[in-house]
Amino acid sequence: MIMTKNLSRTLILTAAALTLGAGAAYAQDRMNAKIPFSFRITGTELPAGNYTVAPLASGSAMLFRNVETGKGAAVLVRNPASSANGAPRLVFICGGGGCSLASLWFSADRGWEFRSEPRLKDIEKERLATIYGHRSKGQ
């Protein structure tokens, strides 16, 4: 009986430690960026402004939150990517119809690419806009 209690206690403490460790890893991936134009993610138009970008607890989505208004939107992360450039940054595809999120990078080995929303007409030229952010400590 005592051995069963000790085993249960050990398993509970191990699970708690793993959960806290995973949360700490996600908390390290947090970025602040000043985005000087309105943009679209997941069908939501967000205004220009200062944004905090951070993973949600599960790590399967990123939350963009406007620092001034507190409003934001989440985008699912599905396509991990890597890059030689380790700077935290957001990359947008822009054209006459506006800009949409193309990729998000916390570091060279922590990045995701997104399917951009089709907003450009065939005759429009698209361009990439890169916004560099800076890492911030999680709250």
Image (tube, rainbow, N blue to C red):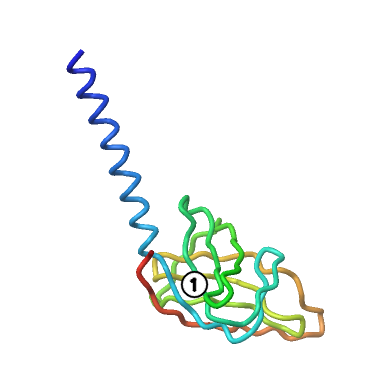
Q: Residue furthest left?
A: 2
Image position of 97 (left or right of 109): right
Instruction: Name the residue at 47% across, 77% down.
Output: 89
Determine whether 84 is above or below 12 in the image.
below
Q: Position of residue 104 (x, y in %)?
A: 51, 70
Determine whether 43 is above or below 121 in the image.
above
Say which of 102 and 10 sits in front: 10
Q: Residue furthest front?
A: 69
Dot 1, crowdedness within 10 Å: few (<14), some or many (≥20)?
Answer: many
How many numbered marks, from 0 up? 1
Image position of 133 (left or right of 35): left
Instruction: Name the residue at 76% across, 85% down.
Output: 96
Q: Secondary structure at mark 1?
A: strand
Q: Residue furthest top?
A: 1
Say which of 84 and 25 sits in front: 25
Instruction: Name the residue at 59% across, 74% down.
Output: 69
Q: Position of residue 108 (x, y in %)?
A: 39, 70
Instruction: Name the residue at 38% across, 64% down.
Output: 139
Q: Position of residue 36 (x, y in %)?
A: 59, 87
Image position of 96 (left or right of 57): right
Q: Position of residue 10 (x, y in %)?
A: 23, 31
Image position of 51 (left or right of 16): right
| Amino acid type at image mark 1 | Thr
Quadrant in the picture for residue 79 = bottom right
Q: Quadrant of the N terminus?
A: top left
Say which of 82 and 9 sits in front: 9
Give the labeled residue for mark 1: 52
